[in-house]
C-alpha cells in the first residue's frame, strides 16, 4: 500500500530532530514508500466548501542540520491525501480549534490522525478529568475562594494553565510560598480561562512517566526526571530521559483509558503518570517516541503506521461525507 500523507505541523526547518515525534513519524512513512507533503496550520483555507492548504512535497533525512528537502510551494485540496497527521504544537487556542473544524470537513476518504473532532473535544487537562479516581486531587477553577480552600486542604500545590503545553507556566507553590495571590493575579489578568490546580506529588522527583498508547494500547514509556531545583520534568526544560517499563499500576491506568481513546478515534496518545496517578492525557501532538526508541528499542513510529495502514481502508469518517 502506498499512501499520500500530509503532515500539518510547525515549521520543518526549526525542529530538533533528535526528539521530534512528527519527524520520526514522517521518516517511518517515507521508509514505507508513502509520499510526504507538509504544510503549516496558518496556510489552511476553506474555499467554496473545499479545505485546502499551501504546502510542499517533503523528503526527510535523519541528519541533524540537513534533515529535509522541500519542493516548491503549491496550493492543494486536502481531500487529495489519504492520511493527514495533525501534529502542530499547542497552545490549544482558537486558531487550533479552528483547524480542527476545517479538518473535520474533509471527506471520509481522508483519514485524519488524531480525529479532529475528538482532539477538539478532548483538551489534555480536561479529558483526564473523566477518570477522577486515577488522578491526584485536582481543581479546575478561576474562583479565588475555591482555589484558596484547595490550597488550605492540600498545602503543597501545582498551578498550571488549563490549555498550556510543554511545562510553560507551571508553578509549584509550597505552603510557605508568598506568591500565591500575585501568581493568580497574573494568570487571571492575562486570560479568562480557569487554571488547573493539583496536589503536589513528591513522586515527581523520581520521574514523570510519558506512556504512548497506539490505538488504545500502551506500547512504550520513557521516564522524565526533573533537574535539581526544578518542579517540571519536560525534556526541553532540562528533564532527563530514562528508560522505563510499565508497572502494574501503569497497565491498570492504560487498561481503563485505552478503550475510551480507541472509541474516540484518538489513535496516537501520550499520557503522563507520576507515581500512581494519571495527570494528563495528551492528544494534540504527543512526543517521546524517539527517546523511547533510543532507550528501550521500541519502534513506536512503526507501530503507529501499522495501525494507520490497517485502519485506512475502513476507518470511521472524521467529518462530513461529500
Image (cartoon, rainbow, N blue to C red):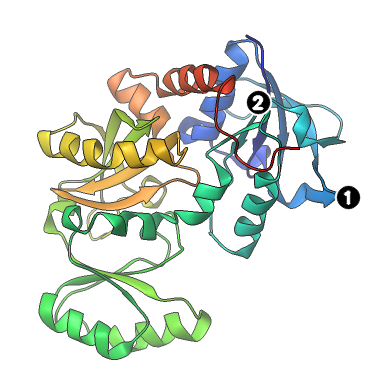
Point 45% across, 56% down: residue: 123
Q: Is residue 307 above or below residue 174?
A: above
- Please state if 107 lies on the left or on the right of 258 as rendered: right
The residue that mark 1 highlights is 48
Which secondary structure lies at badge 1? loop
- The residue at the point 45 percent across, 45 percent down is 283
Q: Specify the quadrant that holds the N terminus.
A: top right
Q: Is residue 116 visible?
A: yes
| Mark number displayed over residue 66 | 2
For the image shown, how many numbered marks are present on the structure?
2
Residue 7, how many percent across, how many down?
65, 34
Residue 319 to residue 200: above or below: above
| Label annotation for residue 17 | none
Q: Secondary structure at mark 2?
A: loop
Relative side of 79 to 267, left or right: right
Residue 92 sits above or below residue 86 on the image:
below
Residue 19 x, y percent position in the rendering: 46, 34
From the top left corner, tell me how far across and down residue 90 is, in percent. 53, 54
Amino acid at each position: 500500500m502506498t499512501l499520500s500523507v500530509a503532515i500539518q505541523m510547525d515549521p520543518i526547518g526549526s525542529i530538533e530532530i533528535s526528539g521530534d515525534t512528527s519527524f520520526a513519524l514522517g521518516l517511518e512513512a517515507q521508509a514505507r514508500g508513502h509520499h510526504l507533503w507538509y504544510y503549516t496550520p496558518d496556510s489552511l483555507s476553506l474555499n467554496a466548501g473545499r479545505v485546502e492548504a499551501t504546502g510542499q512535497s517533503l523528503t526527510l533525512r535523519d541528519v541533524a542540520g540537513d534533515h529535509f528537502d522541500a519542493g516548491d510551494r503549491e496550493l492543494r485540496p486536502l481531500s487529495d491525501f489519504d492520511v493527514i497527521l495533525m501534529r502542530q504544537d499547542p497552545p490549544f487556542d482558537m486558531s487550533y480549534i479552528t483547524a480542527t473544524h476545517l479538518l473535520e470537513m474533509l471527506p471520509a476518504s481522508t483519514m485524519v490522525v488524531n480525529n479532529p473532532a475528538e482532539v477538539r473535544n478532548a483538551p489534555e487537562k480536561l479529558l483526564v478529568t473523566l477518570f477522577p479516581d486515577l488522578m491526584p486531587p485536582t481543581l479546575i477553577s478561576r474562583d479565588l475562594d475555591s482555589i484558596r480552600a484547595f490550597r488550605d486542604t492540600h498545602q503543597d500545590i501545582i498551578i498550571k494553565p488549563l490549555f498550556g503545553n510543554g511545562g510553560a507556566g507551571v508553578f509549584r507553590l509550597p505552603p510557605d510560598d508568598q506568591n500565591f495571590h500575585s501568581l493568580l493575579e497574573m494568570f487571571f489578568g492575562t486570560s479568562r480561562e480557569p487554571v488547573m490546580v493539583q496536589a503536589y506529588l513528591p513522586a515527581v522527583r523520581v520521574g514523570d512517566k510519558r506512556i504512548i498508547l497506539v490505538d488504545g494500547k500502551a506500547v512504550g514509556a520513557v521516564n522524565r526526571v526533573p533537574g535539581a531545583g526544578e518542579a517540571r520534568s519536560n525534556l526541553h526544560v532540562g528533564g532527563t530521559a530514562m528508560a522505563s517499563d510499565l508497572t502494574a499500576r501503569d497497565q491498570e491506568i492504560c487498561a481503563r483509558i485505552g478503550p475510551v481513546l480507541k472509541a474516540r478515534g484518538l489513535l496516537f496518545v501520550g499520557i503522563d503518570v507520576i507515581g500512581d496517578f494519571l495527570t494528563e492525557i495528551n492528544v494534540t501532538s504527543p512526543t517521546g517516541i524517539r527517546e523511547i526508541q533510543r532507550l528501550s528499542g521500541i519502534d513506536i513510529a512503526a507501530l503507529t503506521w501499522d495501525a494507520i495502514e490497517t485502519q485506512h481502508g475502513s476507518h470511521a469518517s472524521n467529518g462530513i461525507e461529500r
